[in-house]
Image (spheres, rainbow, N blue to C red):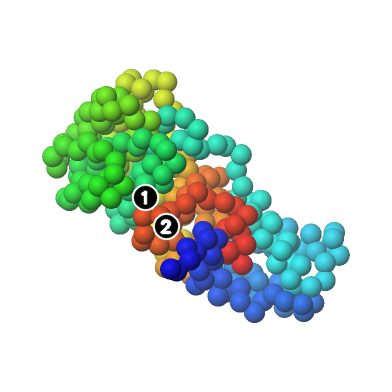
Amino acid sequence: MEQKKSWFTRLKEGLGKTNNWFAGLFGGERINDAFYDELEEAMILADMGMETAEKLLDALKDKVRQEKLSSRDEAKTTLAALIADTMRHNTDFRADKEACVVLIVGVNGVGKTTTIGKLAHLYKERGRKPMIAAADTFRAAAAEQLGEWANRSGCPMVRHGEGSDPAAVVFDAIASYRAKDCDLLLVDTAGRLHNKKNLMNELNKIRRVIARELPDTPCEVLLVLDATTGQNATAQAKAFLEVCELTGVVLTKLDGTAKGGVTVQIHDTLNVPVRFIGVGEGIEDLQRFDADEFAKALL
């Protein structure tokens, strides 16, 4: 029987296209100006963004001077630690510790539906009782797609017909959530970013229903981004920050891109923590983000 791969191995393989940019840069050779130039180019090609790349490079040069590092392997270990520190956050994801509502936002096509199904599976495996609310009533077949994932993860789901009021779906889902004694409510939402005003009104209405019906239950807002879109993922994150208060990001499709560095840029420039990352299509290919593991796998 084939041995199950560790999450770190899957992550490293998933980021293989990204760390190709860094291949050959490290080793026992001495650190020199050419090394810094090549490293900066690799970081930008991996989509860390100019500003984030320069900030990390300046910090690396300082460490090299202070600690009198000489080999490129030492620089690699130091850079991994700097990247991890950049991406570390000290706010807990409340769904890990208590009953919680998690609003899932993001444009269509980024993997919101699959992310909800995988999150439901992840938390169910940890002994939780998730409920799914299909509140993206705008997109045709959104509820059908979500229903398939709900079946796969073995979680109940509440849906209404296409074009229904999303807040009404959430209201009914909360009633069912209470009746079934669930402790995690995952809410899908429409991804109409081109009309920010409508989206903002819709999300505000949903938040009001949650606050009224579950006043003592915290609400997290997770933005799902497709890593393969690179800099466009950062632009989407900025746009959603204008529409709602984000408490975290989920980055999907990291296995299909050479732009994994965008993960670092999003956290660094927007100060929104990355909570989960996806490196495959399988139901178990979404896991909690670990800054140290990610930094090592990236390089």
Is the residue marked by circle 1 packed among few (<14), some (14-19), or many (20+) residues within 10 Å? many
The image quadrant that residue 182 belongs to is top left
Quadrant position of the N terminus in the picture: bottom left
Would you say the residues marked 1 and 2 are in contact, meaning their CB atoms lie under 8 Å apart? yes
The image quadrant that residue 197 belongs to is top left
Q: Say the numbered circle drawn on residue 156.
A: none
Q: Mark 1 to mark 2: distance in Å?
A: 8 Å
Residue 216: image location, x then y, percent: 42, 20
Location of mark 1 (residue)? 118
Is the residue marked by circle 2 packed among few (<14), some (14-19), or many (20+) residues within 10 Å? some
Residue occupying image coordinates x 60% and y 57%:
293
- Going by the numbered disc 2, the residue's amino acid type is Asp
Residue 239: image location, x then y, percent: 41, 47
Residue occupying image coordinates x 47% and y 52%:
287
Left or right, residue 59 beside residue 263: right
Left or right, residue 230 beside residue 213: right
Q: Say the numbered circle drawn on residue 285.
A: 2
At mark 2, the secondary structure is loop
Residue occupying image coordinates x 79% and y 77%:
30
Above/below status of 37 relative to 227: below
Q: 262 or 153, which lies in front?
A: 153
Residue occupying image coordinates x 67% and y 76%:
25
